[in-house]
Amino acid sequence: MNPAYAIGFLSSLLWGSADFLGGIGARRAPAPTVGLFSGLGGLAGVLVALPFFVGSPTPADLAWGAAAGACGAISVSLMYRALALGPMSLASPVFSLIGLCVPVWFGLASGERPRLLSWIGVGLAMLAIPLLSVTGGGEGQVSREHARRTLVISIAAGLVVGWFLVCLARVGGAAGLMPLVVARGSGMAVLVLWLLAQRQPLLPAAPARFPALTSGVVDSSANIAFLIAVHRGPLSLISALVSLAPAATVLLARFTLGERWTTWQALGLATALVAGVCISVG
């Protein structure tokens, strides 16, 4: 078996785990503060990997990196907020799938013509979102109002994630990792300005610091694993594996937080995962 598939699967697990850790941190401190602190871990991870990915970025590459970082800062805050509200089994698949759909529509507007399988994936994603929001009223379940609030924030997070991917995709292939360093820096700058404007502390509460910092490190590790995988295997298949990241978040929430799924949510999760594969492969 091509080891690229194992590395791609590893990147999927890392991304889902990073989301989970960020959500845990956001339950203990405001999401923007957690996002800023996680950025330190993410920046450290990129800087460690920088010498191994030598490139020659152009000013345009750095500008797209800065734009991606700004989108990333907003998306991280929204994602962590959605994950903190929970249930994570609702938040993670929704913002992940919306984040996949945005580049598909952008590509269509740019002249790309996705295959039928991609359109099937988009349709399944639209079906999965309402299924994932169907919560029960029994013990251990959240109210419909709470689920609706999580759903709205998750959709907003997914839209910004999608534009983050679009901006990052504009970075040239020979740019190396420096645009990612710029992205981390610009994202942290946006969060600092926001927190100062809101007169909020820049450091999260002590209980949130470890999961936040670890989330950033794991997120950068996922990026590195993805880059290694796509250099050794087909992009479509590696992307299909990476699109399964919500499964890691949902499973971690199920087995560590005891979140329960309704039958409709379980069906929605399965539909969401199939949609992610269809969009990536198609």
Image (cartoon, helix red, strand yellow):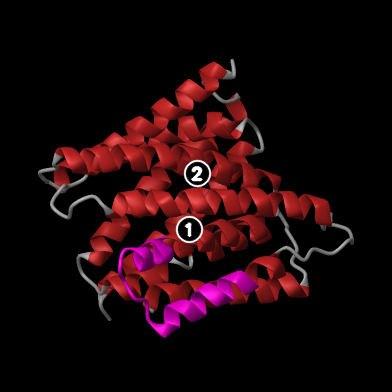
Return the disc, 2 or 1, that comes first in the chain's sequence: 2
Instruction: Please name the amino acid that badge 2 sits on.
Output: Ser
User: Front-most of 200 and 226?
Assistant: 200
**Residue in view at x 58 percent, y 32 percent:** 208
Disc 2 versus disc 1: distance between alpha carbons?
10 Å
| Outermost bottom residue | 116
Our reading of the magenta stretch's main secondary structure is helix
The answer to whether any part of residue 31 appears in the image is yes
Which residue is labeled 1 in the image?
A: 99
Percent x, y of residue 123: 56, 76
Instruction: Please name the amino acid that badge 1 sits on.
Output: Gly
Tell me which corner region of the image, top left, top right, bottom left or bottom right, holds residue 241: bottom left
User: Front-most of 115 and 187?
Assistant: 115
Percent x, y of residue 269: 63, 71
User: Is residue 198 a member of the stretch shown in magenta?
Assistant: no
From the viewer's perspective, is residue 220 above or below residue 87?
above
User: Front-most of 239 and 151?
Assistant: 151
The reply to whether discs 2 and 1 touch (Cβ–Cβ < 8 Å) is yes
Question: What's drawn in magenta, residue-wise?
Answer: 103-127
Find numbered disc 2 in the image and state the secondary structure of the residue it sits on: helix
Which residue is labeled 2 in the image?
A: 75
